[in-house]
Amino acid sequence: MSHLVSLVFLLPLLIFLFQGQLKRITALVLIFAIAITSSYLAFQVLSSGVDVRLTIPLIGQFILVFDNLSSFFILIINFVVITGALYSGSYLKPYIETKPNISFSLHYVCLVLLHFSMVLVCLAREGLLFLTAWELMTISSFILVAFDAEHKTVLKTSISYLIQMHIGLIFILAGFFWVEKQTGIFGFDGLPAYFLKYNNIPVFLLFFVGFGIKAGFTPFHTWLPEAHPAAPSHVSGIMSGVMIKLGLYGILRVCTCLHSDFTTIGVIILIVSLHSGIYGIMLAILQRDIKRILAFSSIENIGIAGIGIGTGLIGLGESNLILVILGFTGALLHILNHSLFKSLLFYSAGTVYWATHTRNIEQLGGIIHKMPKNSIVFLIGILSLCAFPPFNGFVSEYLIFYGLFYGIQSSLPFHIILFITSIIGLALISGLAMFCFTRVFGLGFLGNPRTKYEAKETDFSMLFPKILTIIIIVSIGFLPAFFAKAVSNVVMNSFTLNGTLIYSPICFCSLNKIALVSGIFVIISAAVLLIRYITLKNRKNSFQPTWGCANPGVSEANQYTSTSYTSEYSKLTRPIIETIKDYDVITEDEIFPKKRKFKFRSIDRIKTKVVDRFSLSFVSSLRSLARLQTGYMQHYVLYALVFLIFMIVITFFNII
Amino acid sequence: MLAFILILTVSLFFTGLIGRTKSIFSGRKGPGILQPIKNIILLFRKSGVFSTSSSVILQIAPSIAFGAVLTAAMLIPFSIHGSLISTHFDFIIFICLLGLGRFFMIIAALDTGSSFEGMGANREAFYGMLLEPAFLIIMASFCIITGTYSFETIFYTIGQYHIEYILTSILAIFVFVNIALVENSRLPVDDPKTHLELTMVHEVMILDYTGFDLALIQLSNFLKFAVYGTLIANCLIPAQWNIGFQILLLILIQALFAITVGFIESFRARNRINKNIQYILAISAVAFIAFILALIVNKHTI
């Protein structure tokens, strides 16, 4: 029997046997199979509130636990992976001629494996199984990122991604080992016992760094802006939409095991999240590559969700139930919302790249004239991301704001200062997000084309997954109370306060009012548009060139560029973000200046000053070790001899 | 309902009063108070001229922005007479709706592919981003001193004890006046009468609008002024007064607000563009002082 079960895990390898479109169809079937089984169980758990334990007999016994938290994450994973897999077909079509068959097989096998491992990460409690799933997730996503590995930069970024993920793995491993040494249980089940007896902070910090690298909190974010643009768009959508959320899942899972020190840990998470949020979006504004902008904005959104988690934890510390419910519900809902609109944005940015072969907004412009449907999809994603009603991003940001404003009623001055700082921070984040995405949409999608590029509207197969996502986005926007209640149930079943289950003291009635306001807004706008249409229909409307100060020679090159759009901003942020202008100065003896190049780029100081410096010094210390590698056989034999003698000596003295 | 009707009524005369004040101070005969309304009626009757570079965004943006401002106006109460819709933290919805309107006007400006409009667009986005925290800090300080969470309950409590809260209210009024000036692109941040595109903020964004759309844009600006004027009045109107006197005081305060704006525009020069950021950050700083004051007041009253 156990062998039969293990055969199931080999099914993805079938993809290697098929040809052409059958590969994708097999992958889709497998993904649907995983999604339907896991979603069925997840729904059952979420509706009944009772955990389900499955025992899988496979090389020993593996126990999978469906509880509320994991079921919530599984549903998100399933949805985003399905839309990603549906989207992948058309996106990869142009590569069929240039790529060998094997790389397609590998890609689809890894897509299935990524889905499988992400679901497994949510279900595994036992350390070895969890780490195996975590590692499988890393490796399969590495292969997916490296799809375009003929390009040197893609290969380099994907290897650097692999290395950074393993640094995270070391921290998680260290955390598990530490807990195992004290409690004898290897895995999440050992954590409650450990936290009951020993100091929480060191172990929590180990897990926080380990999971934080996956989630992309600053200063561990450096892999995100490199890996996302390198990967194919559906992979970036899946990675940014759900994979980085599993870092947050890990942090939440550790938080559910805590018994004390909630406030300290909450404050740590809140401060790191605020920094991630503001720093992420500040850097996003200065980028020109659409997918890089989206990657930086993922860091921002992880920060927003983190603010919610921090608020919830501080609420647990203060025994303030309203704060707990609002913080965690806001965070989880934001995780759901971000996975929806970010995957949507990655898919439509990918469609732009697919059609125009460029991601640089300086070279685009006027996409809305050539790809109207895709542009409107992108606009909906942006509106949701910038937290505007009636879309879903607004609901979760409202809940987090609600929690923060509620928090400033606290009696502790430190908490008041912390919450008001978070309010200012969150307001700044949403303002900066608006600045960032008006730039992307206004300069990349509107106006006149800045360079000559070919683009045509895509077919329905590429649009369909986006429409699916939009339906959910809008339904969360108009039924916020329903979704918030469902999510708050997850929170209530996952967290305990002094050993007792928590209940929700609020009814989310205000969310119904929000939906009402959204509805009124939509009705008024639609009515105004209708009146406008009727009045203007019968009049002689005309089309004229854009006003250019009576200068008829205004061309595409005279449009505002993305660099000029941010010039005032980059002046203000110079103390924080370094921007570099590379150009040759025109000397006095150069009477007729030659054609020259101007380069403008921004520098992520955390990357250059902290991460790069550390890794470079590490590499150079390794280089000094390389002196042992002389290339002479005699020396190597000598090393072996020295080692043997060393072993004999230490066993002689009973040291080991 | 009363609040909404009052806002709509006041908004019609607001800009006219500003213009009238300016004309009196500069010694001109000047247009009447109803001139802006006449202009708008004229604009509504015109046909449209659209940029050839533009897309559907340019056409829908003014309507959506107007819808957003009108919906935001529904959230504003009048003293103890509630707003049309009220809920916990409705000021967050308020600020997001105004942000949505701004967002659409910005992308509409970029839609024309103009060489100037990006200038106004990026300034508008930039100033808007810096304004939001100031507004939220003021609302947070109101939340702290009153212990309540919505426009309606906050201003209800402020009206009841307006003498005790007068210091916070004064700072809040200062912040609201300045936010209104920046939001509506008035002096000292932006000069609506300037003729140089390079120094414009709001005006340069709407260069390519005419007719119906321009009328909607101007109407939304009137509305925004009246909304902020009502917020200012709410900080001052005592709840115990008869409703007639309250309405009278509201109209008086709104008129005073309009005259102040006209006064500022008559006697102040526009800031240098790069000084604007400091000016807006100073508003946030004042808001923060109000917050600290609120904390102190709160500790004494409890």
Image (tube, rainbow, N blue to C red):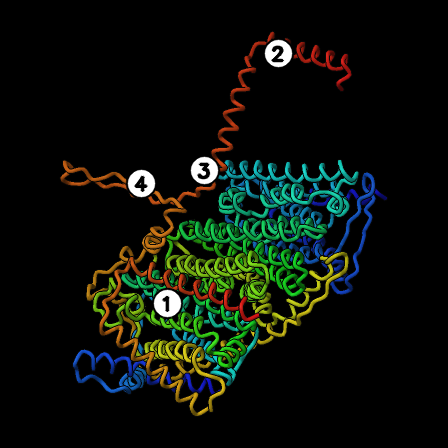
**Spatial distance from mark 2 to mark 4, Cα to Cα?**
49 Å
The residue shown at (60%, 36%) is A167
Q: What residue type is labelled 4?
A: Asp
Query: In the figure, A508 relative to A92: above or below?
Result: below
The answer to whether residue A230 is seen in the rendering is yes
**Spatial distance from mark 1 to mark 2, Cα to Cα?**
71 Å
Quadrant of the rendered structure where residue B231 is? bottom left
Q: Nearer the viewer, residue A13 or A589?
A: A589
Q: Nearer the viewer, residue B43 or B146?
A: B146
The answer to whether residue A27 is seen in the rendering is no
The residue shown at (29%, 62%) is B114
Residue on which disc 4 sits: A582
State which chain disc 4 sits on.
A
Nearest to the eye among marks 3 and 2: give it: 3
Residue on which disc 3 sits: A609
Nearest to the eye among marks 1 and 3: give it: 3
**Spatial distance from mark 1 to mark 3, Cα to Cα?**
40 Å
The answer to whether dots 4 and 3 both sit on one chain is yes
Residue on which disc 1 sits: B108
Q: What residue type is labelled 2?
A: Tyr
Give the quadrant of the C terminus of chain A.
top right
The percent position of residue B143, horizontal first and vertical second, equals 53, 70
The percent position of residue B76, horizontal first and vertical second, equals 47, 79
Q: Please, what secondary structure does the residue beneath circle 3 have? A: helix
The answer to whether dots 2 and 4 both sit on one chain is yes
Q: Please, what secondary structure does the residue beneath circle 4 have? A: strand
Give the quadrant of the N terminus of chain A.
top right
Does label 2 or label 4 sit earlier along the sequence? 4
Does label 3 or label 2 sit earlier along the sequence? 3
Q: What residue type is labelled 1?
A: Ala
